[in-house]
Amino acid sequence: MKTIVQGTAKGIILKSNNPINFLGAVDKKTGIIRDQSHDLYQKSVRDVVLVFPHGIGSSVGAYTIYSLKANNSAPRAMICQKADLTVASGCALANIPLVVVTKEEYDSLVNGNEITIDNDLIK
Amino acid sequence: MELTKDEEAALKGEQGETLELAYRILVATGEATNAERLIPIEWSHLSGVNYNTIGDAGEEFLSKLSQTARVKVKTTLNPMGFDIDSVSKFDLDEDFIEKQQSIRKSYERMGVTLSFSCIPYEIFDLPEKNTQVSFAETNAAIYANSIANLKTNKESAFSALASALTGKSPYSDLRKDQDTHNVTIQMKVDNPNELTYGMLGFFAGKVADNSVKISGVNELDKRSCKSLCAGMGTSGTCGKFILGDDNDQTEKIDFDEQEMQKIHDELNTTDKGDLITLGSPQLGLEEVSDLALMLQNKSFKKRCMVFCPRAVQQQARKLGHINNLEKAGCEIYSDCCTCLTPLIDKKDVDSVTTNSIKGAYYLKNSNGVEVNLKPLSEIVRDETK
């Protein structure tokens, strides 16, 4: 694993198999996924540890991540398989811990389990 | 990532809060893309201008930042939420207009050129080949790398802002003179139009990594090329395409009628629209003049919103094209765009006809309206008299 944005967080894993277009798919006020074709449709990213392959689409998605934090609707941390610039910069500005993990580590993360991210460790 | 002593000091906050923030973003994006260092860039193009997308949190962030922050390189700007010339005709509340003006003023204070355009590559002179730039708008980043011979990461709104404030960006793969594509998309659809190319882009964005090769396409007209760039930027992380043959060792994936139909079914939700929008990305001068020609002796049977940059509207007006478009019933809007527009509200509009895949994705998911996809030639054929 590689830490992109340092920090500590503890929470329940919300895991997706689909990449996320933050601008198009996430409501910045509530944190609810509004893209009907997404596997997290109608779920909220608020206070979870959000596990997803990577971000896609609009560069303005970084503001969506920052807005989620300002509106108290942000995930406590994010874990991706590949870090893209939108998610990395959004998390950096919003102080949301972000780590990138290998395929094996990603596959071992189970939806609904509790997880702790403590700087360079996942427990 | 290795930082110079000066960059290290800035990251620690020794050169003020603004630069600390900018370097924090550059380091995170550098680590994310495995860049070994930062390099100078000459031009930054920012997204994050439309109040509809960045909201109160974005407006407040920019207002505070702009009290002290100033850009270090040429910096241009994406569209905002409305055209001030026509905003009174829409049902936008005072608060929206006020917050949008605050965002405009924040960028102006920071020294940004208020271009309000998502096609900087068409309205500004391009720097010489291989110049390093930082373009946040995704269609512009892909266009810059693939067509305009410039080099940029597929920047985010914040990474481009950090580039503007420092004049630097991570030296990631897309900035290097190496070809890193891992997939070749074989274009197998006959008689493609700009909508086909938008779907090809959307498909390629889904399957490619940072860069992709496309075979079976020899040349692209401006409209098709912009459509491809915008479609690709919407669906993925891919920041560059190369047109070529399929004679290398990379994985080959066909884009055929069946794959195209899947994309069409994902984004096309109805067979007719209450109104038409053209311009996502905004139309350049060539497309405006082309449209005026197509609409000779015709007029739209329903509302048709046309989005182009202010600079293009001014030039096109002098050439008589805007007058011709207005005669054909088009409404011309500058400084804003189809994408994430607050001017189309599901309270008043159920469905929109467009030839833009990018427009369709955001109209459907963000504006929450039904979308009818058609190439421009069919829009003109079916919707005019």
Image: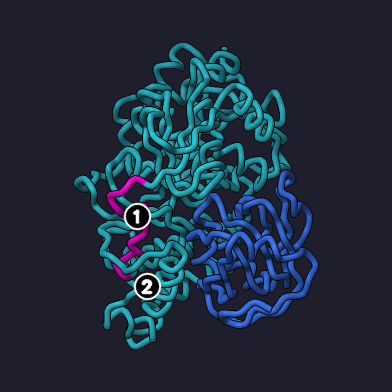
Quadrant into which the C terminus of chain B falls: top right
> Which x, y percent locates residue B303?
59, 28
Q: Residues within 10 Å of mark 2 (few under 14, many from 20)?
A: few
Residue picked out by circle 2? B1
Taking depth in this image into account, of B345 and B355 the one nearest to the observer is B355
What residue sits right under mark 1 in the picture? B76
Which one of the lettered chains is coloured blue? A
Q: Is residue B114 visible?
A: no
Residue B212 appears left or right of A46: left
Q: CA distance from mark 1 to mark 2?
A: 28 Å
Identify the mark nearer the N-term, 1 or 2: 2
Q: Check disc 1: other Cα within 10 Å, few if <14, some if 14-19, many if 20+.
A: many
Q: Which residue is found at the position 52% from the left and 71% from the top?
A: A2
Q: Is residue B280 above or below residue B6?
A: above
Q: Position of residue B6 (x, y in %)?
A: 27, 81
For chain B, the rendered hue is cyan
Q: Secondary structure at mark 2?
A: loop
Which portion, as a residue range, is magenta?
B166-179
Q: Nearer the viewer, mark 1 or mark 2?
A: 2
Q: Residue at 60% x, 61% y: name it.
A: B95
Left/right of residue B123 with respect to residue A58 in the rendered view: left
Label 1 in the same subunit as label 2: yes
Q: Position of residue B279 (x, y in %)?
A: 48, 35
| Chain containing the residue with disc 1 | B
Q: Residue furthest left?
A: B128
